[in-house]
Image: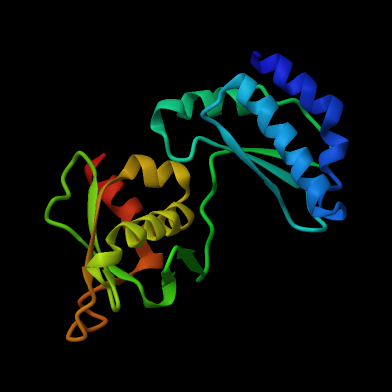
Amino acid sequence: MDVKEFWNWFVANHLDYERLDQLKNESRDDLLDKFEIQLHKYCDQLYFEIGGEPDGSIELIITAEGNIEYFKTVENLIACAPDVPNWEFIAFKPQVKGHFKAEWGPIELDTNSLCFNPSNKSDELGIAIIVYVKDYRSEYEEDCYDCLFKMLDTILGEKSFALDIKKVIIESYDPKLSDDDVIPILKLPDYVRWYKAKYN
């Protein structure tokens, strides 16, 4: 399926997706499965989210789940999107501001308690950061990294996290650290902008 065929299918079926919130779970899941099937006919490495505010436009987000190899595929699809009333088409998961919690397996992280510092591994090729996690336990290292990556994807947005962050290192939070020693995790987008202005 090429770009035109996908959008022709969407235009013919978009009204079904405007009433997702009104459907029972089974019917809703069936529609979402159909959408994924059509999207994967265009590219099986792309995924989507449908949402938005109740009184606003409906947002269709097309994501490559951080896979840089398919970023141009996402951008090409969104660039060819038609004008559909009440719909907004977005390339990549956007940055979301404000505090939140994330869970992955046994791990729960809260942006209120996360902080970071630049690592000395940062250079002109990209940013490396050390993220301090309270009560960090090495036996849950993989789950902790997965949860943190999910959070950073939200804090920075999919594209910035994939392109700007070179390395993430988790260390246990040292109670001896003061507020002057570390940077709150929600300040990471500001740090990325500063870094890119300096090195780009």
Q: In the rendering, at what x and y percent does residue 152 appear?
A: 40, 56
Q: In the rendering, at what x and y percent does residue 17 appear?
A: 81, 41
Query: Residue lying furthest left in this view?
Result: 120
Q: In the rendering, at what x and y percent does residue 136 appear?
A: 27, 73
For the N terminus, give its image quadrant: top right
Q: How many marks?
A: 0
Please give the name of the residue rendered at 84% of the width and 54% of the height, measured from the top-left corner: 24
Left or right relative to 62: residue 111: left
For the C terminus, give its image quadrant: top left
Colour setting: rainbow
Please give the name of the residue rendered at 30% of the width and 77% of the height, measured from the top-left corner: 134
Please give the name of the residue rendered at 87% of the width and 37% of the height, measured from the top-left corner: 15
Say which quarter of the image contains residue 84: top right
Left or right relative to 184: residue 4: right
On screen, 79 above or below 103? above
Q: In the rendering, at what x and y percent does residue 132 appear?
A: 26, 70
Nearer-the-camera pick, 8 or 102: 102
Left or right relative to 194: residue 27: right
Left or right relative to 93: residue 189: left
On screen, 177 above or below 28? below
Nearer-the-camera pick, 25 or 118: 25
On screen, 84 above or below 199? above
Please give the name of the residue rendered at 64% of the width and 13% of the height, measured from the top-left corner: 2
